[in-house]
Image (cartoon, rainbow, N blue to C red):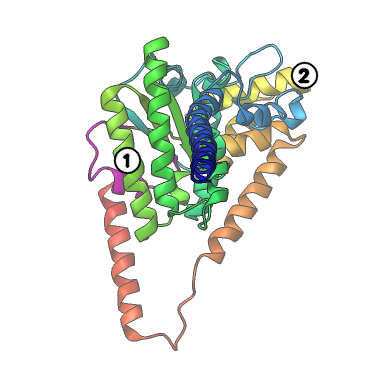
Amino acid sequence: MFTQMLEAAATAFASILVVGSGFALGGYMYHRFYKWLVIHKMEKAFEPGDPVLELAALGKKLPDTMTNLQAVSADETHWILRDEQRKIDAIVNGSERGRYHLLIGEKGTGKSSMLLDAMQKIDGEGVSMFEAHADLEIFRVRLGKALNFEFHEDYIGSYFSERGPRESSALLDIERAFNKLEKVALKRRKLVGRPLIVIINCIHLLRDDEDGRDLLELLQQRAEQWAASNLVTVIFNSDDYWVYERLKQLATRMEVTSITDLPKAQAIAALSNYRQKYFKEEVKSKILAEVYDRVGGRLTYLNRVAKSRDMLKTCDEIIDVEKRWFLNQCWILGEEMDDDVMDQQKFAVSALLLIQCQF
């Protein structure tokens, strides 16, 4: 009887040991497989082809749907080849390294267009681009989509835990994604010898508050570290000057490129070429000069004017819209205003007149 009890206990113990070992081994193998899968998925995010390029290419086939004057037509002919384009091409294709970059300029000057053009030339290989957002959670999701990273939300092991799949804040999730990105970049540097490129568009949309500054500090720390080791080149694209003021405090490897409006000669030549190509029209130089005098060299305005049948009428419409916007931003000081406000207004006007006299 005692012998039978020992045999039964030994059999039960062996069964538990085998089953437990099987579960432990299976769990360990799945955990190792999941880590490999995370890196593999992120590597695929930097393969040729990019969703951003696919979306941008939708408007580049027909002249009436072109999104900008820098768009490439069917025969790959540029309407405007800016001086900054060669530099941006070198940054995006990885030949210029050791720095991270801030592109800064007014909205509509062609910053994003030049980045997309540079990506198209290499078919997006080794490049990932996404739009920034003021909400950290949305920023986290967009970063994960661009890097093809799930933040461990698809990890089956979390089903056996009482806690949810996410046990951290948005900033910690972003840090976790960057840790994986480093491993991908190290592997790529051994194979290809070029850094990865991460483009953060509209970085000025981050709020200038505690959360926004914390995120910007995290991004800059990573950009500095990666630039020093030639792992990843980060490109910040901004329409607002406050980003530069914030980044310059800790910047050692940052390079700033200012994107301005087109000069008069280049803008007039682009308009003339566009009208000849798609409208078979020889525009008089006087009209082209008048167009420039009305809307300047801003690419977004030139694009609208170039595609319209009546260029001067479109110029008037643009001026009217901008004028209404400007007036909506202004306030008229009435009699019920404080005396201090009136004094400040006088000082401001005096300072403005003094600056104008100096120039």
- Hey, what amino acid is under mark 2? Lys
Q: Which residues are magenta?
A: 236-255
Q: Secondary structure at mark 1?
A: helix
For label 2, the SS is: loop
Number of numbered discs: 2
Position of residue 72 in the picture relative to residue 281 (left or right): left
Within-10-Å neighbours for mark 1: few <14, some 14–19, many 20+:
many
Please give the name of the residue rendered at 67% of the width and 32% of the height, measured from the top-left corner.
Answer: 55
Among the 4 quarters of the image, the one containing residue 94: top left
Residue that carries the numbered disc 1 in the rendered image: 220
Q: Find residue 146 and report its horizontal and vertical position in percent.
A: 54, 35
Relative horizontal placement of residue 279, taking residue 254 as reference (left or right):
right
In the image, residue 42 lies at what x, y percent?
51, 28
Residue under label 2, please give it: 280
Q: Reply above or below: 331 against 223.
A: below
Comparing 225 with 264, the one in front is: 225
Q: Amino acid at mark 1?
A: Gln
Q: Residue furthest front?
A: 1
In the depicted view, which residue is nearer to us: 211 or 169?
Answer: 169
Residue 247 among those drawn in magenta: yes
Res 242 visible: yes
